[in-house]
């Protein structure tokens, strides 16, 4: 059983004349342990794919199985629970809560899981240590550099020990040195922690870290190749 | 989790202190006015009711002046009343049990180095039963003193206390205006005030002494009358009016130039007015609570819009609709509870100040206080629900894309 299976997934926005086919009959599978780079020109449907996999959006047609479970029939709260327990998100814009310390940001997913305060704190500190920011736990996002903010966001994504990390252009706002740090971190999570990583990127340098590259064009999966990571 | 939500809400509220304060101002004013109104209202109702109770039963009061003026008005060019009027009333109307003429004037009363400004009344012994007074010390006036105009007096407890402190004033000599007066008795204290004046702050002396030594004329300010049990004020009043018209030589074409007041009726009317006022002002307070609630709703809607991205992040991380709803609802309730608390404190303070100013006794109603508090929480729930639901229903992708 694959971790993720897309069977003829389509997503359309609008209707009639204004209809946009963001995804067109996509068949796609993600295996446990993959580190996939999703590439393609702007508007090709990469983010749409990520949102559907992340249970933030629903396909217009087709079947989506997450760990063997049909997601199509689930309501908003059930999808929220899937996100809470199996998925970790990393965004291009970091998306940390402002005026909230790094530690509190990282604790947030555990708050929703109902983890007791002491354990929550310990696990959040552990996650911050993993991304090399243990000493910045009490800093607010405004006091951190972009690269540091993204690492806090990664800590927040992994603190629940999710099976799958979804990252939509995680290095889009960072310079190349900072980007490589983030990629090293993702690769380490993939290799050492056994987390499956799905990452959208425009940059071939970043895609080189992945073990698999999926390329979208016009809402279709054009190519899907395995590679040796750098 | 709920505790966590409360902590978070408090943090958010504390982060925007000025905005939060302005937001809850409507609730503060609403709750404060309800509590201040009810406190002062109940205090003055209680005061008026004890006035009613302290007035002798079946009491009418006769004053010179045009009808239609309040008990305080009426000092005009109308012929003054006299002690003879009082005697005639008692002699010619069998319904009347007791009649007492009263002349009053404000005087400085001095004992040692203490000076007290007091309403001094000149009257006779019928005054005590008619006005519902008994003596706690000494005696009333003798026939001899009343006839001769001997300068003797009976003190109210407040006056006595001001002059000599605790203790029995009987036997001391005090100065009342320009005359020296021997104290022969003291009234029993009663908890009552008439239109804000302490009844116990009074000096009573024989009418003849008052007229000769203080007022210098033979006028009396009012005549108080009690009528027999079982009769109605409405039946007795016309008889008094008829006799007085005759005595004052009013022809049929002339209107009354005196008033007969039913004191009980005035008191109960005052109670009614107080009640109506309390009701009216409570309605105003209710409206301001409503406006306060709308203020909270408005600011919560603004807050939801401002924090759309935060909501998206929370949803991506795994917050359910219910958890987002709860977060904003609790925030609204925390806001309105803070407003309610400030309102209660302010309202009790204003109520206390008002009670002191009107001299009516501080009577906070704890049920109303608790109700106002609960009601303000309810305002938070009701007016916070719509913005909270809007937050909970946001589409996570849209929310994350916001700005
Ligand atoms: N909410 C929406 N309403 C209408 N059209 C949309 C919406 N979201 C996406 N689309 C359209 O769907 C198509 C795919 O969008 P998507 O965001 O998946 O592209 P992408 O591959 O992520 O592009 P980029 O590299 O620029 O991020 C685009 O043509 C886009 O305009
Ligand atoms: Mg995109």
Image (cartoon, coloured by chain):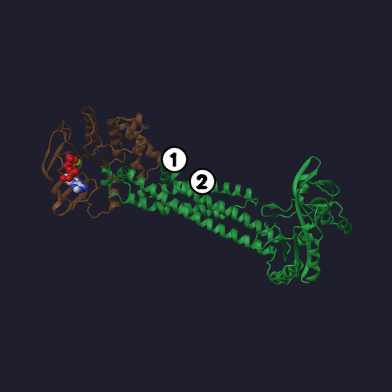
Mark linked to residue B342: 2
Query: Among the chains, which one is brown?
Result: A
For label 2, the SS is helix
Is disc 1 placed on a helix, strand or loop? helix
Rendered image quadrant of residue B272: bottom right
Residue B106, given in percent of the width and then of the height, sits at 74, 50
Taking depth in this image into account, of B12 and B129 the one nearest to the observer is: B129
Above or below, B30 against A160 in this view is below
Using the image as rendered, state which of residue A48 and residue B391 is in the foreground.
Answer: B391
Horizontal side of residue A30 vs B321, given as left or right: left
Q: Residue at x 26, y 54 (%)?
A: A74
- Residue A20 vs residue B264, the one in the foreground: B264
The subunit letter for the residue under badge 1 reads B
State which tag comes first along the sequence, 1 or 2: 1
User: Horizontally, is A93 left or right of B382 in the view?
Assistant: left
The label on residue B18 is 1
In the image, what residue occupies the spot 57% across and 54% down?
B38
Residue A1 in sight in this render: no
Taking the view exactly as shown, the residue that stands out farthest to the left is: A222
Which of label 1 and label 2 is nearer to you? 1
- Image coordinates of residue B130 in percent, x first then y, are 77, 62
Q: Circle 1: is it few (<14), some (14-19), or many (20+) Cα within 10 Å?
A: few
Q: Which mark is residue B73?
A: none
**What chain is the green one?**
B
Determine the image quadrant of residue A131: top left
Q: Quadrant of ligand 1?
A: top left
């Amino acid at each position: 059983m694959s971790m993720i299976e897309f069977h003829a997934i389509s997503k359309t926005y609008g209707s009639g004349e204004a209809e946009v086919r963001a995804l067109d009959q996509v068949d796609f599978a993600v295996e446990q342990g993959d580190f996939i780079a999703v590439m393609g020109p702007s508007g090709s449907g990469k983010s749409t794919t990520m949102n559907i996999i992340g249970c933030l959006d629903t396909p217009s047609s087709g079947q989506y199985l997450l760990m063997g479970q049909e997601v199509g029939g689930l309501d908003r709260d059930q999808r929220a629970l899937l996100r809470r327990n199996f998925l970790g998100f990393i965004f291009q814009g970091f998306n940390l809560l402002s005026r909230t310390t790094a530690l509190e940001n990282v604790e947030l997913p555990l708050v929703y899981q109902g983890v007791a305060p002491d354990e929550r704190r310990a696990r959040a500190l552990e996650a911050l240590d993993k991304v090399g920011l243990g000493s910045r736990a009490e800093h607010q996002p405004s006091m951190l550099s972009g690269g540091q903010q993204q690492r806090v966001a990664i800590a927040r994504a992994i603190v629940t020990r999710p099976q799958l990390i979804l990252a939509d252009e995680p290095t889009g706002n960072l310079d190349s040195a900072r980007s490589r740090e983030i990629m090293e971190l993702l690769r380490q999570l993939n290799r050492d922690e056994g987390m499956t990583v799905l990452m959208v990127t425009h940059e071939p340098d970043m895609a080189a870290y992945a073990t698999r590259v999926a390329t979208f064009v016009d809402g279709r999966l054009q190519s899907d190749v395995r590679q040796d990571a750098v | 989790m709920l505790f966590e939500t409360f902590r978070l809400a408090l943090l958010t509220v504390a982060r925007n202190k000025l905005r939060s304060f302005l937001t809850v101002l409507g609730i503060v004013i609403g709750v404060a006015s309800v509590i201040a109104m009810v406190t002062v209202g109940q205090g003055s109702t209680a005061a008026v009711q004890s006035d009613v109770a302290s007035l002798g039963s079946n009491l009418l009061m006769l004053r010179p002046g045009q009808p239609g003026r309040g008990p305080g008005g009426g000092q005009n060019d109308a012929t003054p009343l006299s002690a003879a009027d009082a005697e005639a009333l008692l002699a010619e109307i069998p319904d009347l049990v007791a009649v007492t003429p009263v002349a009053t004037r404000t005087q400085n009363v001095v004992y040692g180095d203490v000076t007290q400004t007091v309403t001094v009344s000149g009257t006779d012994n019928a005054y005590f039963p008619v006005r519902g007074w008994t003596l706690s010390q000494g005696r009333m006036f003798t026939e001899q003193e009343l006839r001769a105009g001997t300068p003797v007096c009976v003190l109210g407890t407040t006056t006595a206390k001001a002059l000599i402190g605790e203790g029995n004033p009987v036997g001391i000599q005090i100065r009342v205006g320009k005359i020296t007066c021997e104290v022969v008795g003291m009234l029993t204290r009663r908890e009552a005030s008439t239109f804000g004046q302490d009844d116990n702050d009074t000096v009573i002396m024989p009418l003849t002494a008052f007229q000769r030594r203080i007022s210098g004329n033979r006028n009396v300010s009012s005549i108080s009358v009690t009528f027999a049990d079982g009769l109605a004020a409405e039946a007795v009043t016309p008889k008094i009016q008829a006799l007085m018209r005759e005595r004052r030589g009013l022809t049929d074409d002339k209107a009354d130039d005196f008033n007969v007041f039913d004191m009980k009726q005035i008191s109960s009317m005052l109670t009614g007015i107080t009640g109506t006022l309390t009701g009216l002002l409570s309605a105003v307070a209710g409206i301001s609570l409503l406006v306060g609630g709308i203020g909270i709703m408005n600011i919560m809607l603004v807050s939801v819009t401002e924090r759309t991205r935060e909501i998206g992040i929370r949803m991506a991380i795994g917050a359910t609709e219910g958890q987002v709803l709860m977060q904003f609802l609790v925030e609204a309730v925390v806001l309105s509870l803070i407003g309610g608390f400030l309102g209660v404190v302010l309202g009790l303070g204003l109520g206390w100040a008002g009670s002191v100013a009107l001299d009516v006794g501080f009577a906070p109603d704890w049920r109303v206080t608790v109700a106002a508090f609960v009601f303000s929480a309810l305002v938070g729930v009701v007016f916070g629900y719509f913005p909270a639901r809007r937050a909970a229903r946001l589409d996570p992708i849209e929310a994350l894309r916001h700005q």
